[in-house]
């Protein structure tokens, strides 16, 4: 790697990191974007609410026509608080329709947009450590098992729930819940593609059909609220849970699975985590690295975009990248997370059918 010095290093090529990198590079800042994947593996987070879709277009870093690469969503279905499904549409939403995303494709498009605007992108690369140097920061990067150092004046950590690779920065992480996602991706689906949220005794499940002909099923539960036994994520466990979720189960049954390669199972952490502080001299957290939300809120992507806008605006206004004032950004995140926690409790309190540990925890957590 020839270049060793940057204005800003961004760790993580999700929506927060890529949009931040693109907005800074577009204004002439020298930016390195470091991403662990190659945007080929499936990623959780398939729904883009109308307001978030409108914000993506307002940011204007993606090429025109990007929406056509995803499934347009005019309405969704919910069985929350009652067994009868309720259809909700976006006819009166001022922002129009939503999108069911191919999330890996969406994230890759954002990262490639950052490159088009002038950022440098490293894939299959990791920020292993970040420590102070006389010029700002010394960043240890690993790519293809090779380690090297780069220097920068500002580092933005946007690498999800993994935390920040800082030395000497005391970060406190508060976990609101311990939600786990058991996920299933099935090929050969030709049924109803509308997003559906369905509550059941031990959690809730989200399912949606993608324009690729695939069915996505994400089941959310909390191991700590389960009665007895050891929680071991597996396809068998997911299928047993789906037996109590008639709408999601019927969609799985409607998938035309030809071989084992048509079935992908995964599990991932989906808990709500708040990390503080979110910023200091020459650094910040953004996206899920700063605060991760319950997927029920459909707020993860729009949160990431807003973080990227606030941080990039502050950096671009500041006469010194290494001494930017992010007080307003930190105050915004505190207010947003407090509002999220209050709204989450309110929504979980709407579901009163089951006195199970999961729902008791959600109503008060």
Image (cartoon, rainbow, N blue to C red):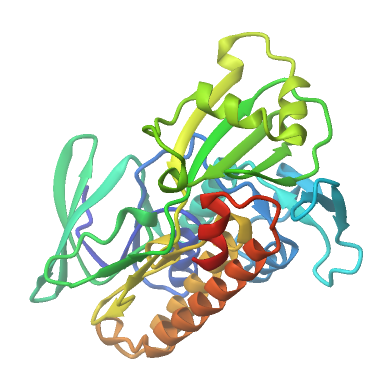
- Tell me what residue is drawn at x 43 percent, y 31 percent: 233
Q: Please identify the quarter of the rendering in which residue 192 is found.
A: top right
**Count of marks overlaid on the render:** 0
Residue at the far front in the pictured view: 355
Q: Please identify the quarter of the rendering in which residue 52 is found.
A: bottom right
Above or below, 283 relative to 253: below
User: x, y (%) of residue 19?
Assistant: 50, 64
User: x, y (%) of residue 51?
Assistant: 71, 68
Q: Is residue 174 left or right of residue 303?
A: left
Between 130 and 346, which is closer to the camera in this rendering?
346
Above or below, 311 relative to 188: below
- Tell me what residue is drawn at x 52 percent, y 67 percent: 364
Tell me, yes or no, if residue 298 can be seen here: no
Residue at the far top in the pictured view: 259
User: x, y (%) of residue 94?
Assistant: 84, 72
Tell me, yes or no, if residue 336 can be seen here: yes
């Amino acid at each position: 790697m020839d270049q060793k010095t940057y204005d800003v290093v961004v760790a993580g090529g999700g929506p927060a990191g890529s949009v931040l990198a693109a907005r800074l590079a577009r204004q002439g800042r020298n930016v390195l974007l470091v991403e662990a994947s190659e945007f080929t593996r499936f990623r959780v987070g398939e729904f883009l609410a109308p307001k978030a879709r409108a914000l993506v277009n307002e940011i204007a870093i993606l090429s025109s026509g990007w929406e056509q690469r995803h499934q347009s969503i005019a309405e969704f279905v919910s069985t929350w608080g009652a067994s009868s499904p309720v259809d909700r549409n976006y006819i009166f939403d001022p922002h129009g329709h939503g999108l069911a995303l191919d999330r890996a494709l969406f994230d890759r498009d954002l990262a490639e947009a950052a490159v088009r605007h002038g950022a440098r992108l490293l894939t299959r690369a990791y920020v292993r450590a970040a420590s102070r140097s006389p010029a700002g920061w010394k960043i240890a990067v690993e790519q293809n098992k090779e380690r090297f150092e780069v220097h920068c004046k500002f580092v933005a950590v946007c690498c999800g729930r993994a935390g920040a690779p800082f030395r000497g920065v005391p970060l406190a992480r508060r976990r609101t819940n311990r939600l786990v996602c058991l996920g299933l991706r099935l090929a050969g689906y030709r049924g109803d593609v509308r997003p559906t949220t369905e509550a059941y005794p031990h959690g809730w499940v989200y399912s949606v059909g993608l324009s690729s002909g695939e069915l996505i099923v994400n089941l959310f539960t909390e191991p700590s609220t389960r009665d007895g036994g050891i929680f071991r994520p597996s396809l068998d466990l997911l299928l047993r849970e789906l037996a109590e979720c008639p709408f999601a189960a019927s969609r799985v049954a409607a998938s035309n699975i030809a071989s084992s390669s048509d079935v992908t199972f995964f599990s991932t952490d989906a808990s709500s985590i708040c990390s503080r502080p979110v910023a200091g001299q020459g650094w910040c957290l953004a996206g899920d690295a700063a605060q991760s939300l319950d997927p029920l809120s459909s707020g993860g992507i729009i949160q990431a975009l807003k973080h990227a806008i606030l941080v990039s605006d502050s950096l671009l206004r500041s006469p010194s990248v290494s001494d930017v004032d992010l007080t307003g950004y930190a105050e915004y995140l505190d207010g947003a997370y407090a509002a999220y926690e209050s709204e989450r409790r309110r929504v979980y309190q709407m579901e009163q059918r089951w006195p199970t540990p999961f729902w008791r925890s959600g109503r008060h957590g």
